[in-house]
Amino acid sequence: MGNQEMPWSAKLLRDMRALEGRDVHLWSLGVMVLLVVAAGFAALVVPNLVWGAQDLRVDGHYLPQLFYGFVTLILLFNLYALNKKRELRHARDELVHQLVRAEVAEMNALKDPLTDAFNRRYFDQMIQGEVNRANRRSSDLGIIIIDVDDFKSVNTRFGHLTGDQVLISVVQMLNSTFRSCDVVVRYGGDEFLILVTDSNEEGAKIALQRLRQRVDAWNSHNLVPGYRLSLSCGVAAYSKGMGIQDVVELADERMFVEKRSKCVPSPEVRRVESAQVANEAPVG
């Protein structure tokens, strides 16, 4: 246990507390200097008050020494205090920079570097909080699973750079379709998960209709000649008492149902294929 590296948050908390201790130390020195000055002044005044003297009498031989001693003490303390304040300000700025860098690093660790969508690690960290909120407020919560149809052929036919651009385009369409309160997650490969908050299953399906319109618009621009983008989607709503993994699996299952339905030829295609088979059959 003693050899384990301290988390960055614990290190920053320790350093901030150390800075607070240095602040207290600096203020303590200031109070001490004030007490010394006050004690010196009292040493001049109190004897006269005790003896009932009407005028303050000080031996002229010691007065310049006392005066220069007080001035020197105050000057040295001010120089020391200014130097320490500069060091404390620099230390605080460095801590703030470390905090910002740590937050950026942690956020980058929770995002997919290619598409800038959140990754599965982020989803695993935040989902229980969203479930608790939905239970507490009795609000709706939904999961959408989206898969790019036949994505492997994109990499095979056009190369991985084109495949990456297709994934980036999909995330851009997802971000423009869903609300800012919804969470877009690259769940793995060419599969995406959308956490839809405060919206029921019907609301999620309406959003998917808008998504399909955007996909049609993307295809109409023929950005990848010879390729037509298609998405399979599955929606499942969370109900109190369900395990979130059960909701994800249900949405995933419904997505595969839609994907399999696209593999079944339409009646028109089946009639054409049957006619072709009949024409190719040997006569007699």
Image (tube, grey):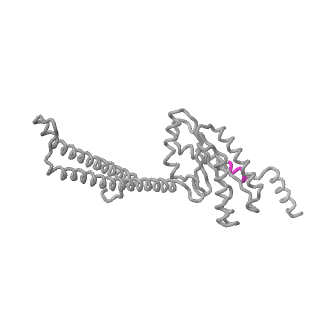
Q: Residue at x 62, y 37 (%)?
A: 200
Q: Is residue 260 magenta?
A: yes
- Tell me if residue 37 comes above or below residue 105 in the rendering: above
Q: Quadrant of the C terminus?
A: bottom right
- Tell me if residue 52 comes above or below residue 73 in the rendering: above
Locate residue 112, reporting x and y percent.
56, 56
| Figure quadrant of residue 84 | bottom left
Q: Residue at x 16, y 40 (%)?
A: 56
Locate residue 235, reporting x and y percent.
63, 43
Task: Using residue 41 as the reference point, say whether residue 188 is left or right of it.
Answer: right
Task: Using residue 230 as the reference point, say whether residue 132 is left or right of it.
Answer: left
Q: Residue at x 85, y 63 (%)?
A: 280
Q: Quadrant of the N terminus?
A: bottom left
| Figure quadrant of residue 148 | bottom right
Locate residue 190, reporting x and y percent.
62, 56
**Start and end of the magenta stretch?**
258-263
Task: Using residue 268 as the reference point, say whether residue 252 is left or right of it.
Answer: left
Q: Is residue 261 magenta?
A: yes
Locate residue 231, reporting x and y percent.
68, 52
